[in-house]
Amino acid sequence: MRKYPQLLTTALDLFHQQGFHATGVDQLAAEAGLTKKTLYRYFATKEALIDATLQLRDDDFMAALDAFVAATPLPQRPQAYLGYLAQWFAQPDFCGCLFINAAAEYPQADDAIHRQAAAHKTRLRNWLQQCCAAAGLAEPVLRAQQLFLLGEGLTVAAQVSGMDTALLQVAQLQVAAWPYQDEAVPAS
Amino acid sequence: MRKYPQLLTTALDLFHQQGFHATGVDQLAAEAGLTKKTLYRYFATKEALIDATLQLRDDDFMAALDAFVAATPLPQRPQAYLGYLAQWFAQPDFCGCLFINAAAEYPQADDAIHRQAAAHKTRLRNWLQQCCAAAGLAEPVLRAQQLFLLGEGLTVAAQVSGMDTALLQVAQLQVAAWPYQDEAVPAS
DNA sequence: TATAAAGTAAACCGATCTGTGTACTTGAGT
DNA sequence: ACTCAAGTACACAGATCGGTTTACTTTATA
């Protein structure tokens, strides 16, 4: 079935580096080392290829996040999420979040591609909530929302303006100050 | 000089609703009520039109932000920034931040359009820093960075997943807790 | 070894893209 | 009234778009 992993990884690269509309089917086939005929045997339309690419990216991203964070003990994992983002931004070919880009190129909320991007963010938010709860943070739902906000802000800032170490540190310091369940809340 | 405001406002709408690549010059001219010939008299290329559109959006956005926030007293203006974002997200035709979208469609950091998007975000960050300093917040530089992160996170979340009142409230509560210069810092 | 699926190479299709050229009309200023 | 810039209407150019077709070759298997 999954006979052409080269095609999907090529698609991931090109969609990231050039955008979806700017990447033609001819280029995709050529750089993946196959013909358009073969490509269209596996994917009925370009949109189907985009769908599959986003699905792969969703799985890869969440798996890599899981793997990265698994190396740190439970209580520090919310901060490790920011560490994961940091090493992602530092990659030389970082071109932003593919799902944010997809939502930008397909702005209508009822578009299938846009909805797929939203679904990924929902998955990420659920993961963050699990993460904050498992870490033993006080008010884990609130913290997960804050962590999501910080991560999205950092991601889009890194995409538009480049990696900003100071901004990252601001986020990291904030998360480091979050109390755990068994700690007393500071007096108001 | 600025003979065709209709063209730029049409371009703003279409680029927002459809994206840059997905919006053709023919459609732009037709919906603005002029001929391609005339359009190309004022803008040498489509990219020049995009540049002008982004410039207009930059000015309009910052001016509207200034006007909105001017109605609230200085100390509450950082929170008013979030209020401005909230009413923006609530507009029925909200399709995300045009500059984030531009950076997504032109992912290469050295692209002129991408750089223009980055320049807008720099301008916004400077505005936020002024805002936090004028409000009398303690650590205004830090607060401006946090406020920027929150705003970008909220914006991209609203764009991808739709307006989220809970998320907005999380941000608003956080900002409301920021101390002012003349307040004592809580004991560690 | 015969067969059928699946691959390559490359022409082809109609539509659309950015951008230009031609011919005609309008309208303001001298 | 004459002029000239700027507008309209619209065909056109060359490239590229997503997608298909034709003809030939490889390859695995019964």
Image (spheres, coloured by chain):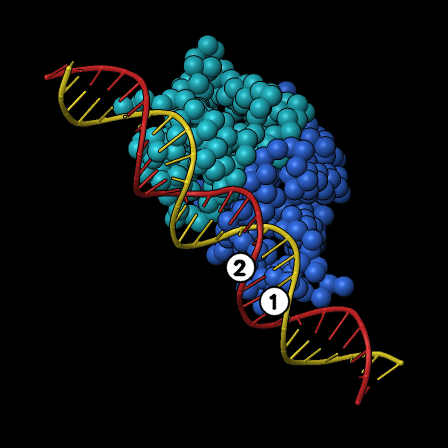
Chain colours: A cyan, B blue, C yellow, D red
Residue B23 position in % (x across, y down): 53, 52
Residue depicted at 58% across the width and 20% down the height: A91
Chain containing the residue with disc 2: B
Q: What residue type is labelled 1?
A: Leu
Residue A120, image x and y in percent? 40, 33
User: Residue B119: where, in percent of width, then height?
Assistant: 70, 40
**What residue is disc 2 on?**
B27
Asked which quadrant contains residue D3, the reply is: bottom right
Q: Tell me, yes or no, if residue B98 can be seen here.
A: yes
> Quick one: SS at disc 2?
helix
> B73 or A84, which lies in front?
A84
Say which label, 1 or 2, has the lower sequence index.
2
In this rendering, would B14 be left or right of B116? Answer: left
Q: Left or right: B39 with respect to B130? A: left
Circle 2 residues within 10 Å: few <14, some 14–19, many ≥20: some
Q: In this view, does A89 lie above or below B104?
A: above
Q: Along the line of sight, which residue is nearer the eye, C2 or A181?
A: C2
**Image quarter of residue B171:** top right
Count the labels in the image. Answer: 2
Residue where numbered disc 1 is placed = B34
- Residue located at (50% from left, 30% from top): A14
Name the residue located 56 percent from the left edge and 52 percent from the top edge.
B15
